[in-house]
Every structure is written in C-alpha cells, then in structure tokens.
Image (cartoon, helix red, strand yellow):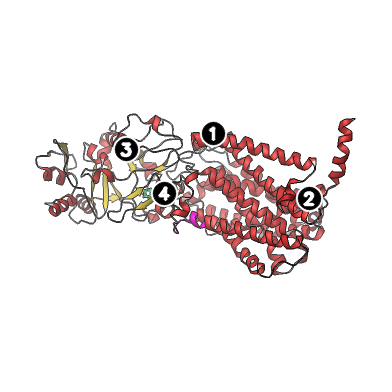
Amino acid sequence: MLEKAFVGDKKYWAWVISLMAVIGVATLFYLRQYSEGLGVTGLGRDVTWGFYIAQFTFLVGVAASAVMVVLPYYLHDYKAFAKITILGEFLAISAVTMCMTFIFVDMGQPFRIVNVFLYPSPTSMMFWDTVSLSGYMVLNIIISHVTLGAEKQGMAPPKWIKPVIILSIPWAVSIHTVTAFLYAGLGARPFWMTAILAPRFLASAFAAGPALLILFCLILRKVTKFDAGREPVQTLAKIVTYAMAVNVFFVLMEVFTAVYSGIPEHLEHFKFMFLGLEGSSMMAPWMWVSSILAVVSLILLLNPKARRNESWLVMACIAVFLSLWIDKGMALIVTGFVPSVLGAVPTYVPTVTELMISLGIYALGLLMVTVLYKIALSVRGQWETKRIIESQRSPVKAGS
Amino acid sequence: MGIDRRKFFKVSGLTALGLAGGSVSKVFSRETPYGDSVQTRTWGTEPPKGPLTAQRWAMVIDLRKCHEQPDCNDCVAACHSTHNVPDWGNPKDEVKWIWKESFEHAFHDQEHPYQQESLKYLPALVLCNHCDNPPCVRVCPTGATWKRDKDGIVMMDWHRCIGCRYCVVACPYGSRSFNWRDPRPKIQKIEPDFPTRSRGVVEKCTFCEERLARGMLPACVEACKYGAMHFGDLEDADSNVRKLLSERYTIRRKPGLGTNPEVYYIV
Ligand code: SF4
Ligand code: SF4
C-alpha cells in the first residue's frame, strides 16, 4: 500500500518536500543539542521538564482521542463514522510517533533509552507509559493495516480483528491515564497532585483530538475528492462540545479547591499561572488567551446554530485546539515547577533550538498524517484531486 | 579484630575512628558554647583498614554551629572537590551535592515572618536526605538510582541513567542535579580517584559510599572543624546520631510527605 505515497501531483510533492525541509533543519538543531547537551534548551536546575515534555503530554491526548471515532463505529455500529475511522487511527499513529520523538529529544542520554526495556522497573510510571504507548502504536498499526487491506480487496475485514479493535478502546484510555499518573503521584509537585488530573487529561484530549479531526476532514474536502459528509462532522462537533464543557468544568473544580482552601503550595501555582508570582508573570497572558478561547469556543459550540454552520464550527475548533494546546502544551508542565520545591520562582523560556526541534517533530507528524491519509484515500480512489486538473494545466502556464 | 572493629565503628563516626586507629590518628577535643564537645582528627600515615558499615546511615546537622561560622564553606568545598563536581557559576546549569540554602527555602513549610532573625537568615546545609522511602527511586524507569539494602544509602549508576530527569522532578528537596552540559571542562581540579560524569546524566550526594568502603567518613563530615555534622548508624541505639536525636530537638525537611529523610537538623 505504501507505493500510493510515492505517486502524487506537484502540490502534494511541494507540501511533502517543504515538510521534509523543516524536518531537515530541525535535525541540524538536534545535532547541536546532541553534541552540546540539553543546556542549549531553556531548561535548567529548577525547571527540568519543559516544552518537549509538554508537547508529549498534549500529543498523547491527540493519540488517545482516536477512540472517539473508533468507539461509536465499532461498538455502536455508528455507520456515519465508517469513512473517518481510518483517519482517526492514522492520526493516532502519527501522534504516538511524535510523542516518542519528543521523549527521545528530551533524554540526556537518548541512545541509552533501551535501558527502560533492559531493566524494566514496574514502580516507575514512565515504564508503564512506555508499555502503554508502544502497545497502542502496535494495536493501531495492526487495525488500520488489516481493515484498510480488506477494504482494498473489497472484502469484509477478518473476524479476529474485532477483539483487537475492542481492546484498543480501553487501551486508548489507558495511555492518557498513565500519562497523567506520570505527574499525579508526586508528593514533590502539589500542582499535579490531584486526582482529577487523569479525567481532565481525557476530557481535554477528547475535545482537542476530534477538533483537529474535524479540521482535517474539512481540509481534505477542500483539497481532495474525499468528503467525510455532514453527519460525521456534526457528530464530532457534538463530541468536542461535551468534552470541552467537561474539561472547563474540571478546570474550575481545580481552581475552586486551590483558591478556597487557600493552601499556599496549591494556590501559588494557580497564582503564577493566572496572575504571576513574585514578578514572574510570563504565563499569565497565555493563560488568559487560553481561557478566553475556551469561553468563545464554548459559546459557539453550545449554540446549535453556530455549531451547524461550518465556518463557525471551524473557528470553534481552532479555538478549542489552541486553548487546550496552551493549557497542556505550555502551562501545565512548566507551572508544576513554579514555585520550585525550595520555594524559588524560576523563569523558563524555550530557546530557538527547542522550538525548532519541536517544529520539526510536528512537521514529522504532519508528514505522517499526509502520507497515511494519502494511502487511505488512494485505496478508496478518492485522492485524485481537483488539483490534478490544475497541475495538468500548470505546465502550459509555466511555458507561456 | 574484624567483628569488634566493625561494631566499634558502628557506634560512632569520629570518636570511634580516632580511638580505634590508635596510632593512626589523634583526637582533639574542645568544649563548645552548647556544652558538647567537638572532635577533630588528623590522619596518621595510613587510614584505617576495613569499611565503615551500618544498618542505616543517617546524618545530624547542627545548624547553630553552622550559623556561628557564616563564612565557613569547608564541607561544601571538600565534597565538591572530592567528587569532581563542576562549577558552572550560573544557577541554570548548576550541579551541587551539598550547599547552603536559606532556612526559608530549606524549611519552606516551617518558617514564619516573625521568626528570630538568626533563624531567618540561617544558612541551612542541604544535601540528599537518603530518604528511607525515596520517591526518586520509585520513579526511575531504569533502576539507575536505588536504595541500598545493607545501609539505606540512595545510590546512583551514572552509566545506566538515561537522563530522563524524572528523579529530579520527584525529589521534594531539589537534591538532584542534571548535567546539562559536559561537566569536565568546569571541574577545577580533576580528582583521579573518583569518576567524572558525562553530560546528560543525573548526580547527587552518595553519603560518600566510596569513602565508607575504605573506612573513611564522608568528606563533608571529615572537613567540618566545628562539629556541626554527625554521621552514624540509626539502627544502633548507642550511636552518636541516636544520642543526639534522643537528646536534642531535631527537625527534618518536609516530614509530611512520608519520604522519611535521614538527615536531621538541630536548630
Ligand atoms: S533527598 Fe531527594 S534525591 Fe535524596 S533520597 Fe530523598 S528524594 Fe531521593
Ligand atoms: S534521570 Fe537517570 S536516575 Fe533519574 S530517573 Fe531518569 S534514568 Fe533514573
């Protein structure tokens, strides 16, 4: 099936090559980081995890959110998702790849990572996270390969795949739960030590992931023959609405507990996040943007008229995605370190190197999404685009 | 003499060392304003043979004595030069095994604004607490840090550590340092008897297990001229540390977290 990735029109190649260029540049930055050490990042003694780990956390959510299309389709036989289930699974595979790459670039000794398997340590949540993420990756590769292969031959997928798919549902929940457990079990970090962290992770994941999937479906409709159809997009929009509402509710519960109890070690983190602490207010503007975007998205999503209008829906999805990305991909991890365990207020700003490497990993993810979606749609004969006609015309244009 | 000698060492650090050595070292004693005696020792020609052992090593630090010597940095200097700890001169890359922290920071949850002046600015010596229930060990995905069964020391394997820094995140005391860059160029004088570390691994105080194995007290304890640091066996009811703990009011850092730190402070 992979051969489908190697035939495409000019636009396709231009897109693929520009993504590769970004990955190439990012690789150079990584080589610098590899030879000089993680000192080239903004991380330091007090803020030991930052942008990389935050992206990892956010993307585990995107990966887990595939369950929001898999579950209705396979468990409830919700036919409207038939066309997009494979898109969800391929998004999950790409997201898990990004997660693993983010972990890799965050390691001080990346080539010793095999030690996690050589000396398995079941008391460590990082061990379980590795197990659950790799398992999820394998499950999704098997499922998408088998179902798409069957579709290519015009046959029903083999029976044995059904239990594998069912297994992938709780497994998706587990990857984000275990990722929350990475943080939630540490007495040293009161900001994360909250039982609602895993539920909150899941809620935000089930909002951000499907929002992204909606955007992908609409983009595909624009640039290819593939049309997900109105119903699945609207159903996804409802899922985003519920999940976002639950997420905001969970966040407000966190704020209540911290503010009403007034216990400094909980409260100070929230102060840092929304108001600034001891003159360090770098996070506050971002958090306000995130909060405003959350409110705006909810107003749009909860209003059926706006939700049913696809251009409003696009705005709402972008707002959801950005809001949650700021919350999880920026604030959540760094705030755990401010104030530090000794009560200091460190500053952390990611460096250009850090941002470029991260950009490269996102480009890698997008490249995977592109290639995998191309394969899926080519199998269905839906990739051939309006653009082909354009690209056939363009040489004439170029010549004239 | 094997058993007797080892048992003798268990009783206490300094005194036992001085006496057991006989020809090896000399003990000087003087009274302090607090009525306890300070012992300093000089090595003779050869150090005592046989390792120092204990069932549970612990340390008692007398902050009042540190406070009397605001300019003294002997323990820190001794530790860092013995263990090839680099000096980065900036807080971001900083690597440290033992250092002076303000009381307010070291005992974050126990200070208040009207505290006696001396306490407020009291520099508290902090180092790895060799917790009895160490969260750093619990989170390590490779077993690169572990609690040694025989004496409770929290150990580090710099060759196995993958540099994930999970242990740094999990330690409630900021006791662990990560090598953000290659430390070797920043080591003032490389001590050939002790390994240097590479970039990308975590390090911390090891209660000088390499010295204990050669029958020597931790470098910081040995360097302290004022008797502020006491090192001994917590399981031995007659040890120096047990004596101090039963006679003095002592506190530990963040006791509420259940980590059971084994460094105690007399304030
Ligand atoms: S002080 Fe920190 S590094 Fe040392 S044993 Fe306790 S938790 Fe681990
Ligand atoms: S940084 Fe090293 S010692 Fe610390 S948790 Fe990771 S592998 Fe273990």
Q: Chain of mark 3?
A: B
Q: CA distance from mark 3 to mark 1?
A: 28 Å
Residue position for label 4: B172
Residue range of the region highlighted in magenta in the rendering: A121-128
Pointer 3: what residue?
A: B83
| Residue at mark 2: C-beta within 8 A of ligand 2 | no
Image depth: mark 3 or mark 1 in front: 1
Residue A12 percent across, percent down from the top left? 77, 43
Residues at marks 2 and 4, CA–CA distance in whole angstroms: 49 Å
Spot occupied by residue B242 in the image (x, y as percentages of width and height): 22, 53
> Residue under mark 1: which chain is it in?
A
Disc 1 on helix, strand or loop? helix
Q: How many marks?
A: 4
Q: Position of residue B82 (x, y in %)?
A: 29, 36
Do callouts 2 and 4 point to residues on the same chain? Answer: no
Task: Give above or below for B79 relative to A319.
Answer: above
How far apart marks 1 and 2 lie (CA) works out to: 37 Å
According to the image, label 1 marks what residue?
A32
Quadrant of the image occupied by residue A168? bottom right
**Rounded to the nearest whole Å, what is the CA distance between mark 3 and mark 2?**
60 Å
Mark 4–mark 1 distance (CA, rounded to whole Å): 32 Å
- Marking on residue A220: 2
Q: Is mark 3 within 8 Å of ligand 1?
A: no
* Amino acid found under the numbered disc labelled 4: Pro
